[in-house]
Image (cartoon, rainbow, N blue to C red):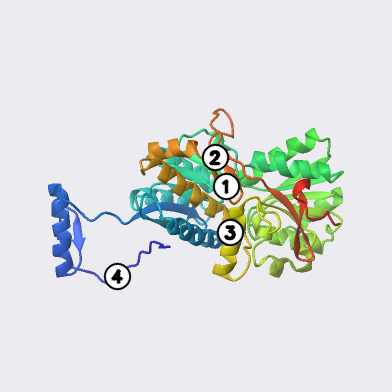
Amino acid sequence: MRFSARREGREQPSVIDKGGREMRGNGKSLWILALIVGLVLAGGPVWAQDTVKVGVVGPRTGTAAATGKAFEEGIKLATDYVNAKGGVLGKKLEIVFEDTAGAPDKAASGFERLVTRDKVALVLGESHSSSALAEIEVAERFKVPFIVVEAWADPITAKNYRYVFRAGPSNTGVVNESIAKWVVSEKFKKAYIVAENTDWGLGIAELSKAALTKANIPFEMLVTERQSQDHYTELNKIKAFDPDVVLAYIYGTGLHYFVAQAGEVKLTPKAIVLDGAGPPSLWPDYWKNVGDYGDLECFVSSMHEKVELTKLATEFRQAYVKAFGGPPTDYKSRSIYDSILIAADAINRAKSTDPEKLVEALEKTSLEVTRGTVKFGLEKGGTTYHQWEPPMLIVQWQAKQQVVLYPAAAATGKLKK
């Protein structure tokens, strides 16, 4: 794998090409560069690019920096896999990773740099819905295919943009196919919804309200700050309602504060907390931050070592252990892995990096990856356009072991309270 790196070097002499552009370098390199420019201007041959570039966007810094680490792990394994099988269009696949830090403005500018500076064929990634919603506008403006990996807000696909695809969960899919059905199957009598004030948090909370109403399960709801470290007042309010289950739509380390403090005020273990995002409950610092209060917490996940839907899922886990010395701790490493395979498959089938041909190839995708067989929806007018919804699991921590509770066909144990 080759990550693109850019570092400031020593100031070099410069020359100006025929287009008025400044070129820097030592004397010998300047003559070589000038010769190349001259050949280009004259229509002569130049050295061919030896890689096909694909961009990745995601948070490598900020409260969700662990996602960036998971993406890096998945990138390594996927590029090794693709390049070992011949790469794309007979060339090596190269990934260029832009840090979005969970900030929409930084996400949009990073996406634009990948397109204009790095000339990527398409872009993958993202885990913050607010960032993805900014990025899809750039994708449409530049007509560059964008495969969203782990940003769940419904409007990402509901806008029905031609160049936007999602190979990952949506709020509607996660709530209607997993969370709501699990709440009903466990016969919870009362629920409380806690939503961070983001596009993802507020969106998934509204869907949960509708699902609980339909199931005739009483509930209350509150909105919390995304980066809050103090939930005590909110937790005492929740405790007074005496719910059986708390649907916690809080992302990042903020979820860790919520779980730890829920234990301190003795809301848990009487009430079960479900982490509606998933990865924060799998991050290496989870147990360090929550201590014993993390036990019996439930979370949404697309990965479990005993529930592997395809042969490739097993191969991925084995490759991960070999490369990193232990099993994966964040399923987003596998999500980005799948998306890179989807991108490589589309480029090879399109026999081109032309964006229109790539869109056509993506729409015809039928590819088995770690989470199942990818097929994107083609019907416009709703959230399923250009959407592939991978199956999700409800998992509970039991004595620091992951036990699958739902769906029943994949269960490895039963809920403990």
User: Which amino acid is tagged 1?
Assistant: Ala
- The disc placed on residue 315 is 3
Q: Position of residue 246 (x, y in %)?
A: 78, 50
Q: Nearer the viewer, mark 4 or mark 3?
A: 3
User: Element type at marker 2?
Assistant: helix
User: Which amino acid is tagged 3?
Assistant: Glu
Which of pointers 4 and 3 lies earlier in the amino acid sequence?
4
**For residue 310, above or below residue 293:** above
- The disc placed on residue 9 is 4
Q: 369 or 116, which is in the foreground?
A: 369
For the question of whether residue 380 can be seen, the reply is: yes
Identify which residue is drawn at 13% across, 58% down: 35
Instruction: For the residues labelled 2 and 1, say whether their Cβ atoms are less than 8 Å apart.
Output: yes
Instruction: For the residues labelled 4 and 3, say whether their Cβ atoms are less than 8 Å apart.
Output: no
User: Which amino acid is tagged 2?
Assistant: Ile
**For residue 152, above or below residue 378:** below
- The disc placed on residue 156 is 2
User: Element type at marker 4?
Assistant: loop
Residue under numbered circle 1: 151
Which of pointers 2 and 1 lies earlier in the amino acid sequence?
1
Instruction: For the residues labelled 3 and 2, say whether their Cβ atoms are less than 8 Å apart.
Output: no
Which of pointers 1 and 4 lies earlier in the amino acid sequence?
4
274 lies left or right of 252: right
Task: Measure how far apart labels 4 and 3 are at the Cα level.
Answer: 41 Å
